[in-house]
Image (cartoon, rainbow, N blue to C red):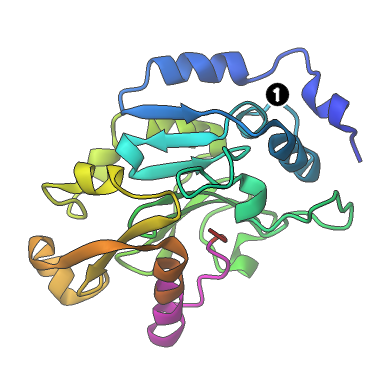
């Protein structure tokens, strides 16, 4: 086990580089203030240093709100109100106190989008967790297919990609004219539920004709997981606790 000081006091922390990346973001970005104690709890349990983008993000930010709130990246947490973002530790159900016997071998849920899409960093055995891709790289649970997709990048490159302005292409066919206003109006405990569901032929054929409303994110994730288990392609496993 590495003590907290060993994880924080490194010669080349990633935070200055991340700040430069944030300043140059092509996508609208809000960097939330961090709950210091929660960020340190998260860092200690993960046993990663501030030299990594993942470690620096939880230590120095409450999380990132990207593209007007369409994507939320979990960091050290920004508080406990509905308009505060939960921490990476809370989303991944870390123990209250450091537990040396517990490690996120199945990976970490590091972000959600408002449709119930899940961004996860793969652990040592992605297949055992029902995820695509290789260890140490990102995977995305797509709400329109109910399947995990390999992203073929690590966490740091994923952050760069989020801020590169390419989300419009990534979400092509999944956004409607008022998506910015709808996403910005949400609490961070909420997402947008679409009916007919995004994975149906009706939604694929005409997204504009669907009905959309705010709903608790845990409910959106729960419905998607239930349908994935019942109808296929497979049990998606853990999608985060929000």
Number of marks in picture: 1
The residue drawn where x is 20% and y is 63% is 212
The foreground one among 188 and 72 is 188
Name the residue tied to disc 1. Answer: 51
Give left or right: position of 85 versus 168: right
Furthest toward the front, the residue is 81
Q: Few, some or many C-alpha atoms within 10 Å of disc 1 (few <14, some 14-19, many ≥20)?
A: some
Q: Quadrant of the N terminus?
A: top right
Looking at the rendering, the stretch of residues picked out in magenta corresponds to 224-239
Residue 36: x, y in percent? 70, 31
Residue 94 is a magenta residue: no
Q: Secondary structure at mark 1?
A: loop
Quadrant for residue 56, please give it: top right
Quadrant for residue 220, please give it: bottom left
Q: Is residue 229 above or below residue 176?
A: below
The residue drawn where x is 38% and y is 69% is 146
């Amino acid at each position: 086990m590495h003590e907290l000081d060993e994880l924080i006091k490194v010669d080349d922390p990633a935070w200055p580089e991340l700040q430069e990346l944030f300043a140059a973001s092509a996508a609208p970005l809000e960097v939330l203030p961090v709950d210091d104690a929660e960020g340190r709890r998260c860092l200690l349990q993960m046993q990663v240093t501030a030299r990594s983008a993942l470690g620096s993000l939880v230590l120095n930010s409450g999380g990132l709100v990207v593209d007007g709130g369409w994507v939320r990246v979990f960091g050290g947490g920004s508080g406990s109100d509905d308009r505060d973002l939960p921490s990476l530790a809370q989303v991944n159900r870390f123990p209250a106190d450091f537990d040396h016997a517990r490690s996120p071998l199945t990976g970490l849920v590091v972000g959600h989008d408002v449709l119930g899409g899940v961004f996860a960093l793969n652990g040592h055995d992605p297949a055992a967790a029902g995820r695509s891709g290789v260890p140490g790289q990102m995977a995305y649970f797509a709400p329109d297919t109910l399947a995990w997709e390999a992203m073929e990048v690590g966490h740091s490159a994923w952050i760069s990609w989020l801020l590169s302005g390419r989300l419009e292409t990534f979400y092509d066919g999944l956004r409607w004219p008022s998506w910015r206003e709808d996403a910005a109006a949400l609490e961070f405990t909420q997402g947008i539920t679409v009916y007919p569901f995004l994975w149906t032929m009706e939604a694929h054929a005409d997204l504009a004709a669907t009905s959309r409303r705010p709903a608790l994110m845990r409910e959106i994730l729960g419905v998607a997981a239930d349908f994935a288990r019942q109808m296929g392609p497979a049990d998606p496993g853990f999608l985060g606790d929000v």
